[in-house]
Image (cartoon, rainbow, N blue to C red):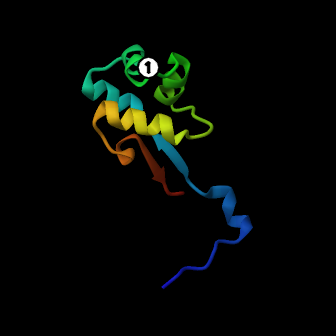
Amino acid sequence: MKSEPKPLQVLCNYGAIEIHLKELMEQKGISRYQLAKLTNTRFEVVNKWYQGVVERIDVDILARFCFCLDCCVSDIISYRKPA
């Protein structure tokens, strides 16, 4: 059964996307510099993901991270429902 869309006034508390790249990199023992080199990505881009301050998700970068870290998208990003 399909649920009804939420009214606009509810959107002020819609949850958040969380980025877990830092934790994953620490588990794998890889530095930001190493990941930047492996993925052919600028250090600044990797650093934003590492710090969890990504404004727009680039699916190509995300795919590179998944390939190089041998993980799934859900290992890097997740959705936290509102309280």
Residue at 56% from the left image edge and 40% from the top image edge: 57
Q: Is residue 7 visible?
A: yes
Side (left or right) of 14 relative to 19 = right
Side (left or right) of 60 relative to 14 = left
Could you say which is closer to the camera, residue 71 or residue 11? 71
- Where on the picture, by quarter, is residue 36? top left
Q: Given the current orientation, which residue lies at the most extreme bottom position?
A: 1
Dot 1, crowdedness within 10 Å: few (<14), some or many (≥20)? some
Could you say which is closer to the camera, residue 31 or residue 59? 59
Q: Is residue 20 visible?
A: no
Label 1: which secondary element: helix
Residue at 55% from the left image edge and 39% from the top image edge: 58
Q: Position of residue 49 (x, y in %)?
A: 50, 30
Image vertical order of residue 82 relative to residue 18, above or below: below
Residue wearing tag 1: 36
Q: Position of residue 43 (x, y in %)?
A: 50, 17
Residue at 54% from the left image edge and 57% from the top image edge: 82
Could you say which is closer to the camera, residue 12 or residue 32? 32
Q: Position of residue 83 (x, y in %)?
A: 52, 57
Side (left or right) of 82 relative to 69 = right
Q: Position of residue 75 (x, y in %)?
A: 35, 43
Disc 1 residue type? Ala
Q: Given the current orientation, which residue lies at the most extreme top position?
A: 33
